[in-house]
Image: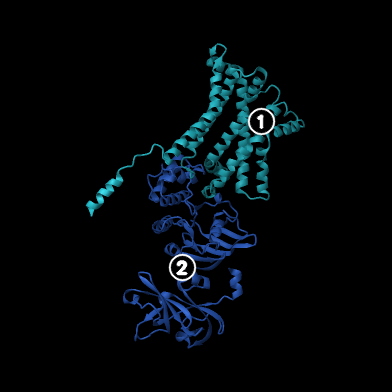
Chain colours: A blue, B cyan
């Protein structure tokens, strides 16, 4: 039960930058997820918070205490690893009680706490077993009980579900969230799995190449991505590179005009750049509406294109439509809308608002990645 | 259809008369024969020794022979055990931290250092013996004390302790140590309660190898043993040189063999079950 503050936290391995000036404030009891592709520095960040890796710059604070160079044992953290990492030679009870026994707690107190923790994770009565006699999911739950037993200030999770199969992941992620809520612990969770991050986080930090791309709630990150990386990494997105060519109207009726190839796009979104500057206009596939023959087109943008491919996925179908030389993906769901002729049929698409992100100059892109 | 098929199927199910020696059976018989041949070749010399140790001037007298071993060679056996025990302690004390440093820390020249440390394995015993005699001449009293011999044994055998420990530590994922430290354990607690039990198999392998080698070492002992200290293997050689092959010497040899064998059994009993069970290794 503690706030966590990272101030310009940095880690270099030789000339390689693993984490670059990471700033983050985690509130007491908050569940924050670090999300990013492998090698983005999220695990290194977590390990610096734990004290398993020494930073080359910056500071880590728990509440107002500077813990930057404290060893892990002095930080009172609970770290759940990718593998359960239960000590194979100790029983489940001895594993859960390990943190208390190294602090020389009384035997009776340890036993009581162990029982309480095992009951909390739904494994009461499993104390005498050896870890090898448990399933993967049970082992990870024992690992949870083990870190909770010491009543840590902060819970740290390093992709704890990645070694489990899909169904188990789904149930266990809600168990983790539930335990975090019931114990009111501050939690920092690392994952590369968006659905996991979206399911359990209060806030998500999207990371890429050692840098923070965006910090926000699920809706902020999904609906208003701030960088090209976030727009493309989170969910599916159509990115239309173009330039801002003008602004029409004023006040509520103001529209930014973006030209992308042969397309002229209108959006209520305010231009993030001056006229003439390059931007990328992002459009979620589910926001693209397929217009039926003769249907009135009540959209800011109506474009016509050729269906190149239909991918039927069950509840939805993906349409790949060639619109003036650019490929647009449109996801349609439900009923008659799923039935489209294979082949190169003509189709009309309507959509309203686009997310405009200033295009990164090519040299920044290459140095950042 | 069925009536047409059934007789044919039935006919094919009637087993053809099994040849007495088909290829598979032959391989079976031959491999068993080979195993037995090996057993006999390896065990026969020991059986001969055992048989001889039971003989004496007045027919068979195993009791007297072995009683003689205890009374007359008891000192030599005790020295052997004492030297072995001290060597094992030194080996463990030196090798555990060394193996941990070699595996868990990176430093320049690590591979070279490990190669140098294992060098004694490839140096002939006579070379070690001569070099140590020469070296000990420069020291205060290593030539005249038991410790000269103990140090010589440790020098020759500690790679046998170090190597299995290095292998065991390399196989031990570092996550166990990290988990322990995150749970509040000090380095020492982590080492004693997590690392040491989990490398038990490696440790026991090292102890076993070193014990067998040290307990039976003759050549190096010949060079560096201090006056008045005669280990069991040395005594066997001395007896044979001075008094020829007598049944009592054979009895001493048998006793040495039994002690070595007992050590193997004891180690497997201690470490083989207690520490292997429940580890990720098994």
The image position of residue B255, as x and y in percent, is: 56, 23
Can you tell which mark lies on residue B150? Answer: 1
* Dots 1 and 2 on the same chain: no
Residue at x 30%, y 43% (from the top left corner): B14
A26 in relation to B245, above or below:
below
B238 in relation to B31, above or below:
above
- The answer to whether residue A227 of the structure is visible from this angle is no
- The answer to whether residue A139 of the structure is visible from this angle is yes
Quadrant in which the C terminus of chain A is drawn: bottom right
Residue A243 is drawn in which quadrant? bottom right
Furthest-top residue in this view: B58
| Chain of residue at mark 1 | B
The image position of residue B68, as x and y in percent, is: 58, 16
Residue B240 is drawn in which quadrant? top right
Q: How many marks?
A: 2
Q: In the depicted view, which residue is nearer to us: B86 or B135?
A: B135
Disc 1: CA contacts within 10 A as few (<14), some (14-19) or many (>=20): many
Q: Tell me if B131 is positioned left or right of B210 in this view.
A: right
Q: Which residue is mark 2?
A: A217
Q: Tell me if A96 is positioned left or right of B236 in this view.
A: left
A56 in relation to B237, above or below:
below
Disc 2: CA contacts within 10 A as few (<14), some (14-19) or many (>=20): some
The image position of residue B170, as x and y in percent, is: 57, 47
Can you tell which mark lies on residue A119? Answer: none
The image position of residue A204, as x and y in percent, is: 48, 65
Furthest-right residue in this view: B138
Q: In the depicted view, which residue is nearer to us: B144 or A189?
A: B144
| Chain of residue at mark 2 | A
SS for dot 2: loop
Q: CA distance from mark 1 to mark 2?
A: 68 Å
SS for dot 1: helix
Q: Contact (CB < 8 A) between labels 1 and 2?
A: no
């Amino acid at each position: 039960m503690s706030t966590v503050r990272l101030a310009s936290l940095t880690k270099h391995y030789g000339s390689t930058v693993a984490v670059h000036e990471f700033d983050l404030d985690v509130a007491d009891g908050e569940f924050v997820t670090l999300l990013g592709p492998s090698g983005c520095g999220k695990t290194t960040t977590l390990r610096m918070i734990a004290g398993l890796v020494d930073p080359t710059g910056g500071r880590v604070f728990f509440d107002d205490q500077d813990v930057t160079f404290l060893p892990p044992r002095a930080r009172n953290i609970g770290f759940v690893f990718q593998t359960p990492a239960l000590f194979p030679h100790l029983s489940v009870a001895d594993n859960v009680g390990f943190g208390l026994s190294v602090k020389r707690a009384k035997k009776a107190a340890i036993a009581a706490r162990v029982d309480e923790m095992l009951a909390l994770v739904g494994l009461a009565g499993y104390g005498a077993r050896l870890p090898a006699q448990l399933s993967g999911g049970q082992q990870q739950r024992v690992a949870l009980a083990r870190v909770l037993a010491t009543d840590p200030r902060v819970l740290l999770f390093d992709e704890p579900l990645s070694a489990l199969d899909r169904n188990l992941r789904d149930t266990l992620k809600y168990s983790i969230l539930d335990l975090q809520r019931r114990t009111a612990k501050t939690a920092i969770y690392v994952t590369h799995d968006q659905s996991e991050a979206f399911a359990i986080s209060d806030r998500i930090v999207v990371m890429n190449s050692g840098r923070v791309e965006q910090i926000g709630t699920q809706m902020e990150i999904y609906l208003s991505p701030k960088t090209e990386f976030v727009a493309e990494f989170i969910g599916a997105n159509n990115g239309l590179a173009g330039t801002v060519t003008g602004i029409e109207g004023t006040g509520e009726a103001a529209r930014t005009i973006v030209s992308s190839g042969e397309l002229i796009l209108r959006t209520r979104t305010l231009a993030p750049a001056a006229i003439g500057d390059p931007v990328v206009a992002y459009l979620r596939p589910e926001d693209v509406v397929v217009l039926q023959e003769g249907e009135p087109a009540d959209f800011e943008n109506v474009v016509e294109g050729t269906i190149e491919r239909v991918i039927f996925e069950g509840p939805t179908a993906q349409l790949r439509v060639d619109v003036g030389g650019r490929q647009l993906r449109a996801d349609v769901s439900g009923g008659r809308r799923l039935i489209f002729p294979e082949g190169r049929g003509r189709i009309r698409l309507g959509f309203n608002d686009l997310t405009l992100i200033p295009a990164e100059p090519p040299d920044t892109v290459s140095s950042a990645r | 259809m069925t009536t047409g098929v059934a007789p044919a199927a039935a006919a094919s199910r009637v087993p053809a008369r099994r040849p007495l020696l088909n290829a598979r059976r032959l391989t079976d018989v031959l491999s068993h024969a080979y195993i037995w041949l090996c057993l006999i070749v390896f065990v026969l010399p020991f059986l001969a020794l055992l048989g001889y140790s039971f003989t004496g001037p007045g027919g068979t007298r195993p009791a007297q022979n072995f009683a003689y071993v205890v009374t007359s060679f008891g000192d030599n056996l005790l020295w052997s055990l004492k030297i072995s025990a001290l060597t094992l302690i030194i080996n463990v004390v030196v090798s555990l931290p060394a193996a941990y440093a070699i595996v868990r820390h990176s430093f320049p020249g690590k591979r070279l250092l490990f190669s140098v440390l294992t060098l004694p394995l490839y140096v002939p015993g006579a070379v070690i013996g001569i070099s140590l005699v020469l070296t000990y001449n420069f020291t205060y009293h290593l030539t005249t004390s038991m410790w000269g011999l103990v140090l010589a044994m440790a020098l020759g055998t500690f790679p046998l302790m170090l190597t299995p420990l290095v292998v065991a530590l390399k196989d031990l994922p570092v996550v166990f140590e990290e988990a322990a430290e995150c749970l509040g354990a000090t380095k020492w607690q982590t080492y004693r309660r997590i690392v040491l039990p989990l490398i038990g198999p490696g440790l026991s392998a090292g102890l076993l190898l070193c014990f067998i080698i040290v307990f039976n070492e003759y050549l190096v002992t010949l060079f560096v043993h201090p006056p008045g200290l005669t280990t069991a293997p040395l005594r066997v050689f001395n007896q044979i040189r001075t008094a020829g092959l007598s049944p009592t010497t054979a009895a001493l040899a048998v006793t040495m063999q039994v002690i070595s064998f007992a050590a193997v059994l004891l180690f497997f009993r201690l470490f083989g079950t207690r520490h292997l069970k429940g580890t990720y290794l098994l």
